[in-house]
Amino acid sequence: MKPISLEVEVVTSLGDLRPDGMLVVLPVDSKEPSKPDNLAKTLPATFKAEFLTVAKKRKFTGKPGASLVFDGADGVRKGVLCVDLKSSLFELLTVARKNVDSVVFDAHVKNLAVDLTHVGAKGDEIADAWISAAAAKLYKFPKYKTPKKVKDNSEDDEAEDLSVVFVVGKPRVASVEGSVARALNATTSGTNLVRWLAKRSGNDLTCKAYIDYLRQLGKERKWSFKHHDHDALTKMKAGAFLAVVKGSEHKDYGIVELTYTPKSKSAKHLALVGKGMVFDTGGHCLKPSAYMLGMHGDMAGSAVALAVLNVASLESWPVKVTAYLAVADNMIGPKSYKPNDVITSMKGTTIEIIDTDAEGRMVLADTLHLAAQTKPALMMDFATLTGACMRAIGTTYSGVFTNRDELHADLIKAGKESGERVWPFPMDKDFAECLESTVADYKQCREKGGLDHIEASQFLMHFAGDHSPWVHVDLSAIEHSGGLAHVPTEETGFGVRFATTFLRDHFGIKY
C-alpha cells in the first residue's frame, strides 16, 4: 500500500503562514438558518466582503452542513462551513466527505488552514472529521491497468500532497492534537489498509500472497508470527477449517497468528479473530455469478483485525494483542465438502454441513477455539458473515453480538463516538434451537429462512466459549454505495475506528 502525504499542525495563530486554502467553521442553529450578514461578523476582514458578495449571488443560507466555497481575489481558495454543534460524529464525517473535494482537491489546494476558533470543544470532532476525510480521499486503490505517463514521465495517479493547519484557542491545542493523531492512525494505518487489502483481486491476493504479506508486515512491526499450515491444522484436528479448503488446489492456507507484545509484563491479553476468505465460490452450493462478484473482498474481516493490531502497535497500547487470521478460500472441486457431510471441529464438536456457502462460520469456529485456549481478557472477531445482517440493519450500520449483555451500552457508545455505528442483536439461547441436528452435535445452519445473522452468531459463540467476554462484528457496512461517513468509495474499511474506540475505552487506554 502506497503511503499518503498528509501533514498536520495545530496552532493558535497562522502567524506568517500563507495557505492557499482557508476554511472557517461556524456554528449555526439547526432550527433557523443563519443569514450571511450574521455569519460574516466573525469572518476575517480579508474574507468578509468577498463572502458577502458571493453569498448574495448564490443566495446562500447557513443551514447545518452547508458550505460556501469560492476563489478569492488573492488566489486563495476560501470556504465557510456551517455546523450544528449538536451534530453526531457520523454526521460531521459525512459533511467532511461531501465538502473536502470542493474545499481542497477540486482546486488542488496544497496548504489548507481550518479555523476552529468559533466552535469550542466541538473542534476536536471537526478536526477528526476533516483529517479522516482527507486521508481517505488521498488514498489510492491498487490498479491493474497499464500506467499512463504524463509529461514529466511520472505516473498519472501519483498521490497528492496536503498540509493542514488547524487554528484553535490555546486551551484546545492538546485535545485537538490528540484527536488528529488518533484519526490519522485509524485512517491511514487502519481504514485505508482494510480498503487496500479488500480491493486486491483474487488472483493477486491469494492465500500464499496474503500470508507472505502478513509475514513481512510482522517482521517490519516486530510482531511474533506463526503460520498454522495444512500439516499443523491436521495435527490440531481443525476439521471445520480443513473441510472448507478441501477443494483448494494449493495447500497454502492456514491460521496466522500475529502478536504485538508491549513492554509491560503484566499486560492483559486481547485476541482479535478475522475471517480471511480470499475468494468464496460457495463451494458445491455454488453462488450465482452476480453474488460471486466481489468475493475477493470476503477477507475484509481479517483485514480489520490486522488493522486494529496495527493501530495498537503504532500507539504502543499497554495490552498484548494477538490477531488470529483464518486465511483460506472456498473453491469447488471433486474433493470439496458437501451438504450432509459430518465433520469434527478442533473443539471436538461434530457439525452437520447444510450449506457449503456458510463457510465463514466454519473457518472461524476452529480459529475462535484456538484463540479461546489462551483465555484472553477479551475476544473480538470480525467477518463479512451474513447477508441477513445487511437485510436486518442495512449497510450504514454493522451488527454486533456478544456473550456479555452488559457490553451492549459500551458497544453502542463506541459506535457513536467513532462515527462507525453498530447495533447489538439479542443472543437468547432459544435462537440456537434451529441448530439442533439428528446426526451431529450441531447443524452448521438451518436449511432455509430464519435469522441467520443471529443464528450464525449462536454457532460461533459455542466455539468462542464462555471463559472470556466475546464480541462478534458482522461487517454489513464494509461496502456502501456512494461512500460512508468520511470514506468516499464503496469500499468503506468499516470497523477500525469503531473497534479501536471500543477497545481503548474497555482497557482504559489513554492516547
Image (spheres, helix red, strand yellow):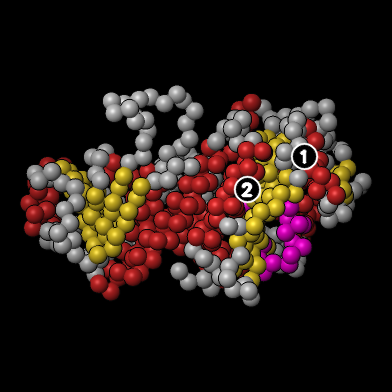
How far across and how far down the image is residue 309, in percent?
57, 57
Q: Quadrant of residue 12?
A: bottom left
Q: Which residue is mark 2?
A: 215
Residue that appears at 35% across and 25% down: 149
Give the residue drawn at x 88%, y 43%: 342
Tell me: 148 left or right of 322.
Answer: left
The furthest residue to the right: 439
> Which numbered dot is residue 262?
none
- Gap in angstroms between the C-alphas marked 2 and 1: 23 Å
The reply to whether callout 2 and callout 1 are in contact (CB within 8 Å) is: no
Residue 504 visible within the image:
yes
Kind of residue at badge 1: Val
Q: Nearer the viewer, residue 265 or 338?
A: 265
Report if residue 64 is visible in the image: no
Identify residue for label 1: 244
> Which element type, helix, strand or loop, lies under badge 1?
helix
- Name the N-terminal-most of marks 2 and 1: 2
In the rendered image, the vertical position of residue 86 relative to residue 449, given as above or below: below
Residues shaded magenta: 367-385
User: At 61% across and 57% down in the image, what residue appears?
Assistant: 223
